[in-house]
Image: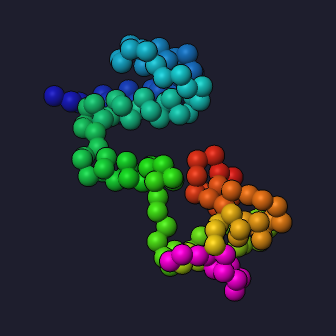
Amino acid sequence: MTNPLAITEEVRALEHLDLDGLRHAWRRRYGAPPKLRSVDLLARLLAWRIQAEAFGGLDAETRRNLRRASASPRDRQLSAGSLIVREWQGRRHEVTVGECAYQYEGQTYQSLSAVAQAITGVKWNGPRFFGLRAGSPT
C-alpha cells in the first residue's frame, strides 16, 4: 500500500539534490539515469516517475492525446480556412490556407515558400518559415 505522505516527502527531498544527487537517486530506483544536464528537468522527471509509480500514471486517453499533440509537425495537415500566423521583424503576418493556394495581404500564392519570399524578400522553405517543420525558427 502506498503511503502518500512518504511519497510527498520523497519528492520534496528531490528539491535539495544537485545533479549528481538526482542521478544517484534515479540510479537507485530505476537504473541508468537519463543523460540530462538540467537539474530542474531531471528533478521533475524523477518526481513524476516516483508519483506515477505510486499513484498510477497517465490514463490511455491522456497518453493518446499527448501522442497526437506531439506528432511531428510534418504529419500535420492544414485544412482550407486555417490561419497561419508568423511574426517577422516585429510585424505579424497572417496567411489563410485555401483549397489549392494561400492568401496573404490580398494576394494569392501557390506555395508557402512564395508567401515567405514575399514577406522576407529572400527565398525560404515556406513550411519551415511558418514553423510547420522540425527545426523551424521560433
Task: Give, as a single range, the part of the protein colored magenta.
Answer: 99-109
Q: Residue at x 36, y 31 (%)?
A: 49
Q: Residue at x 82, y 61 (%)?
A: 122
Does 108 lie within the magenta span? yes
Tell whether 72 sits left or right of 105: left
Q: Position of residue 84 (x, y in %)?
A: 59, 70
Q: Residue at x 21, y 30 (%)?
A: 2
Does 73 lie within the magenta span? no
Tell whether 3 sits left or right of 101: left
- In the image, residue 49 above or below residue 133: above
Q: Position of residue 65 (x, y in %)?
A: 34, 53
* Image quadrant in which you'd find residue 50: top left
Q: Position of residue 64 (x, y in %)?
A: 30, 50
Q: Residue at x 38, y 26 (%)?
A: 10
- In the image, residue 42 above or below residue 24: below
Quadrant holding the N terminus: top left
